[in-house]
Amino acid sequence: AAKAPLETVSGDEGNAALQALAALGMAQTTYAHPVAMTVVEQAEHVGHLSGMLTKNLFLKDKKHGMFLVVAEHTKKVDMKKLPKQLELKGKTNLRLGDADLLFSKLGVRQGSVSALAVMNNADNDVTLVLDADLASAATVNLHPLRNDRTTSVAGADLVRFVNHYNHEPVMLEFEAGGAPNGAPATAPAPKPKKEKQPKQPKQKKEKQPKQNGGGKKGKKDDGLHQMAIQYTKEDDFAEWYKDVIRKSEMIEYSDISGCYVLRPWSFKIWDVIHRWFDDQIEELGVENTQFPMFVKQDALETEKDHVEDFAPEVAWVTRAGDTELEEPIAIRPTSETIMYPFYAKWISSHRDLPLKLNQWCNVVRWEFKYPTPFIRSREFLWQEGHTAHASYEEAFDMVYDILTLYRRIYEDLLAVPVVPGRKTEAERFPGGHITTTVEAYIHGSGRAVQGATSHHLGQSFGKMFEINYEDHKGEKQIPQQTSWGITTRTIGVMVMVHGDNKGLVLPPRVAPKQVVIIPIINKKVGIEQIGPFCQRIYAALKAAKVRVILDDRTHYKPGWKYNHYEQKGVPLRLEIGPRDFEARRATMKRRDNGEVVEMAFPDDADDAAFAADVVALLDRIQSEMFARACAARDSSVAVAHDWDSFMAALVEGKLVLTPFIDTEEFEDQVKERSREDALEDGEAEDTRTATSVAGKTLCKPFRCPYVGWLPDGVSDAEGSGYMVNGRRVDFFYEAIPEGTPCFFTGQPATAWVLWGRSY
């Protein structure tokens, strides 16, 4: 349908910007329309007009001052590249300015910002950054200091206008293709405060993100779900992430920095993972158990290498009420030193082996890097398995069986591709023999995340804790042990990989609710008529084991519900309106790609067949989400054989596969040199940052499809995995062609090593 004609405003309505344009002799046409808080809403009203719309970012930096960035609304403003584009020297920390600062400097409220607002910047302390394409545009459509009006002016006149008010704009070329959805037409609401690391010995409260618009303390934010995500994934990934996990009701901040409340929506995802993994390890003969969360100091310090690595993160209990304890008691950072004294009691004969135990619990690691919910916190949930075996090979098989399950959690449940591999010697679990890992990649931030680890401990812990047994010959032996764990970090990785500027996008297999049914009523067709039809669909899906919710609440409008469930990432929305009811059908909208599908459900339909079609659609959503995530990851992998190409790929946020000498000395040198090369001269990196610019080894991959060859004895198998000497395996440790030079030293490399910037 054609747009209704816009009302053209006659005169200047007392508007200072329109008066200024007239005084300067600049032609303009102004249109009236409903209030538009974002450029997306503005486009709905005036997007059919010829000319360019603008998106506007009001930014501040403690050292470099304030900036108003104005770009054509589909252009990409890369916040990582912007400081270099502006030639800002030294350390930069560009962040969105809040509403109060916006008004004090540019004299406009949220939703009304445009380049015209610099007329109010009498102190001339806001730098205007202008998209060069706007300056040469025939027409630019922008707000004249109010967001229920759009004014059309020539690009050349816009430049003359800002020059008249002593603002010489910095002209930049921005990349095409930046999605406008969610990009604010004005400065967004006050930013969530960054989590501050408490200084010892006093404990400070973690500053929590304000709910949108701030508000008085204790005042309930009833409109939480009606507000769009205030940050975009492209422009401010860290703030976008925190905004998404709060508005989707996954997380709440506690009074202690780095400790969070997992709300039911996120805990249900963890519960799905928990139940699936329990079923799998039960098939491997693993039993669940529970050990105390406290460990005595002498037990913790039994394994020197082990405790040295965890020592800075250990939290200690030193008092009970007003009484000082005789000796401090540690809260478990991991449970080897708690469990293994009991293993020494329980294992005395080869008949006691294998011993395979697992526990689901919380652990505390009081680290001093800045926390990120799910990804890096001081208390988190995990499972930890600990097994003891009679042979090295049996323990080795256990390590890889578990690593396969961890890969399946990410890939089959969470639709997140991972790279399985072996950690370098520098990254090996303290006290262990071999550490294997699955490494995920976050395309939006250009960073890797360690997904889960499975360790072959060898006999080191057995020696320390005097775990031994008599073999079938009556000789004393020390068992071979393993330990392995996966945490609630899985949830954060999933959010980062799949989420978009509307909120969560959940893979169906872990979504707490896979389908939401929303009845749409009007004066002629009420819930009394539509309700039974919705109930029938609900019952059919419920019978098919679909996790479904019927939201028939009448005090919320359909639009509110759409936004609510989009933010929560429900994979499939079924809308049942009067026309759907009459036609006996369901209109289905996919959360992952917005595709709309109509599915008939006549009175004589087979309910089970209808439900089976919905289940098939959910399966397709799952597989397509995984395929998109794989494509995003694979497009961000580079192979480097020299330092310059390594750094070029690292700075671009890619995973970098290199031939390397696996020594701790050279690994430390690469990490330090890559940090220095990435920083400006004289610039220092905050030691507490969890997002270092240094390159870090992720793993020695078991599969290297990017180098285009397979070692001797290895061939492709059908499906996932390889055949190694006639035996099907999911993973293998890939040898490197003899004589391949290390990218860093030039000496013969010992392994392919995957690097990246990591959380």
Image (cartoon, grey):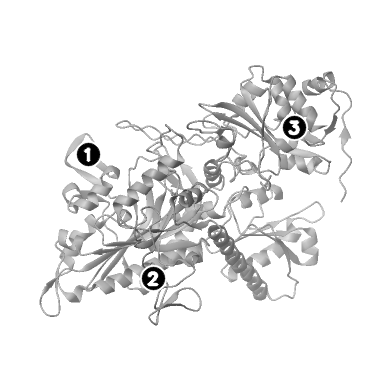
Quick one: 629 or 471, which is closer to the camera? Answer: 629
Q: Which residue is mark 3?
A: 147
How far separated are the C-alphas under marks 3 and 2? 60 Å
Please, what secondary structure does the residue beneath circle 1 have? strand
Relative height, residue 309 to residue 124 (above, below)? below
Instruction: Tell me if mark 3 has few (under 14), some (14-19) or many (20+) residues whose alpha carbon lies within 10 angstroms of its own.
Output: many
Image quadrant in which you'd find residue 506: bottom right
Image point 51% across, 36% down: which residue?
209
Side of 557 relative to 34 (left or right): left
Q: Is residue 230 above or below residue 340?
A: above
Residue at 64% in and 55% down:
551
Q: Mark 1 or 3 closer to N-term?
A: 3
Q: Is residue 385 visible?
A: no
Q: CA distance from mark 1 to mark 2?
A: 47 Å
What is the distance, in whole Å, between disc 1 and disc 3 at their CAs?
Answer: 59 Å
**Res. 675 visible in picture:** yes
Q: Amino acid at mark 2?
A: Phe
Give the residue at mark 1.
Answer: 318
Q: What residue is pinned by disc 2?
A: 732
Q: Residue 189 occupies which quadrant of the picture?
A: top right
